[in-house]
């Protein structure tokens, strides 16, 4: 039996540009929410793509009804107005949002990845059961899509990127704080957003937009957000440094930096949705990340690296980045990609730095693979010290 994708378009004809059939799925198209809900009540739907034009509330109400009937369906929304003041709120009810100007092949690609996530959760009853409890799965913010549109524009400029970022004062402050940290070692204080974007690079800027949005949009009761943010930034910077030391090219180094910014996405999702359960696990782990992953497996049947990787797959992030996030608590192995090695070593290094309160003593460290990192630890430790001043 073919997997079914439901297209719901109450305004316009944008979704008609998508093909009727694809190798891996069958499509059904309707133009009213009532017709869509009737179909959902009659057959299994794996993924829903909805376009309600500017009627954001109607779209939100539709998905509210959907979730009472088929909470396991992957939910995508096509947005006609990226500048609407209500856009950020309306994005909270879907797993991924697309601009109306998004090329059809990008939507098809995202559908295939969404179906891959759906099939994987169906094959793992514990994961499927957990995802049904997660009412708040984060989506990229409107600012992220505006930046992506600018970066894809033939008239792209760093100045335009800076203007988009400037619309968010909190994000602008974070970006300037990062670029002026000890890790980047700029010769003078940077107060200009255009200069900051040039120094950080667009990949890291996009990663910062996503990471900052996670901290600002998800309720994280009882957590010190400054400490979480510092941990995230230190892992990101360490992953970039380690990737470079391992011989990665420029693109892979940047990818590792972004993966570091998003590596604990799964943990943030668990905190936002199951705070009491997850806080209990954090207290039991007492700062031991390896133990925390084991406790997550026992409690939920899945750990935060896999949850984060699933959400990133829904976001249509690069495969290498998803792989790095999924593997950042694995044991070190020679056959792993550089991005996986860099992120798991960075996570281990930052946690060791915190456990030993910044005091370097190689004999007391629990190394993952002495042969691979011998002679490099002290230098990597210095990266953590630089980021501690953030």
Image (cartoon, grey):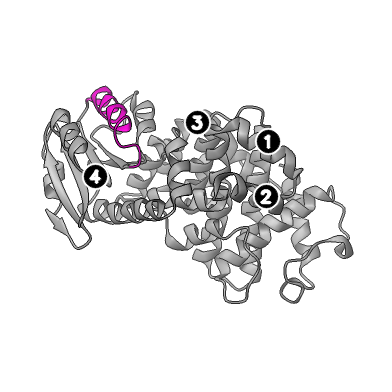
Distance from disc 4 to disc 1, alpha carbons, whole Å, reads: 36 Å
- Nearer to us of marks 4 and 1 is 4
Q: Earlier in the sequence, mark 4 or mark 1?
A: 4
Q: State which tag comes first along the sequence, 3 or 4.
A: 4
User: Is 357 situated left or right of 272 in this image?
Assistant: right
Query: Residue 369 falls in which quadrant of the image?
Result: bottom right
Q: Report the side of 37 relative to 332 (left or right).
A: left
Q: Position of residue 85 (x, y in %)?
A: 34, 23
Give the class, few, some or many, for how many residues have Cα within 10 Å of label 2's Cα (few <14, many ≥20).
many
At mark 2, the secondary structure is helix
Q: Which mark is residue 234?
A: 2
- In the rendering, which numbered label is found on residue 252? none
Q: Which residues are magenta?
A: 55-72
Taking depth in this image into account, of 278 and 379 the one nearest to the observer is 278
* Image coords of residue 82 (percent x, y): 30, 33
Q: Image quarter for residue 161?
A: top left
Q: Residues within 10 Å of mark 3 (few under 14, many from 20)?
A: some
* Residue drawn at 48 percent across, 48 percent down: 126
Residue 67 among those drawn in magenta: yes
Q: Are marks 4 and 2 in contact (CB under 8 Å)?
A: no
**Location of mark 1 (residue):** 280
> Would residue 215 be found to the left or right of residue 357 on screen?
left
Question: Visible in this render: residue 289?
Answer: yes
3D distance between C-alphas at marks 1 and 2:
25 Å
Residue 62 against residue 262 in the figure, above or below: above
Q: Residue at x 74, y 41 (%)?
A: 284
Residue receiving disc 3: 217
Residue occupied by mark 4 = 44
């Amino acid at each position: 039996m073919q997997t079914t994708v439901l297209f719901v378009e109450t305004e316009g004809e944008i979704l008609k540009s998508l093909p009727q059939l694809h190798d891996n799925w069958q499509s059904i198209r309707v133009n009213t929410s009532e017709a869509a809900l009737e179909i959902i009540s009659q057959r299994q739907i794996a993924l829903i793509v909805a376009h309600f034009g500017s009627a954001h509330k109607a779209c939100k109400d539709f998905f509210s009804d959907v979730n009472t009937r088929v909470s396991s369906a992957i939910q995508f929304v096509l947005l006609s107005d990226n500048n609407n003041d209500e856009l950020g709120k309306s994005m909270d009810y879907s797993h991924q949002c697309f601009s109306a100007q998004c090329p059809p092949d990008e939507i098809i690609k995202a559908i295939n990845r969404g179906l891959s996530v759906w099939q994987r959760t169906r094959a793992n009853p514990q994961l499927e059961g957990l995802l049904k409890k997660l009412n708040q799965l984060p989506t990229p913010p409107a600012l992220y899509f505006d930046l992506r549109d600018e970066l894809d524009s033939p008239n792209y400029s760093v100045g335009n990127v800076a203007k988009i970022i400037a619309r968010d004062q909190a994000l602008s402050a974070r970006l300037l704080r990062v670029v002026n940290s000890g890790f980047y070692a700029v010769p003078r204080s940077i107060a200009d957003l255009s200069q900051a974007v040039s120094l950080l690079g667009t990949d890291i800027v996009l990663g910062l937009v996503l990471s900052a949005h996670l901290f600002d949009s998800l309720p994280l009761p009882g957590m010190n957000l400054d400490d979480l943010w510092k941990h995230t930034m230190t892992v990101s910077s360490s992953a970039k440094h380690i990737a470079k030391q391992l011989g990665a090219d420029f693109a892979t180094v940047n990818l590792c930096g972004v993966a570091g910014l998003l590596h604990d996405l799964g943990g943030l999702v668990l905190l936002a949705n199951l705070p009491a359960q997850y806080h209990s696990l954090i207290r039991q782990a007492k700062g031991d990340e390896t133990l925390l992953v084991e406790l997550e497996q026992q409690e939920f049947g899945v750990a935060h690296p896999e949850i984060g990787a699933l959400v990133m797959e829904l976001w249509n992030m690069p495969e290498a980045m998803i792989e790095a996030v999924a593997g950042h608590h694995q044991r070190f192995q020679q056959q792993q990609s550089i991005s996986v090695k860099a992120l798991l070593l960075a996570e281990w290094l930052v946690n060791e730095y915190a456990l030993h309160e910044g005091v370097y003593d190689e004999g007391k460290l629990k190394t993952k693979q002495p042969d691979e990192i011998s002679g490099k630890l002290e230098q990597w430790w210095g990266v953590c010290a630089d980021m501690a001043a953030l």
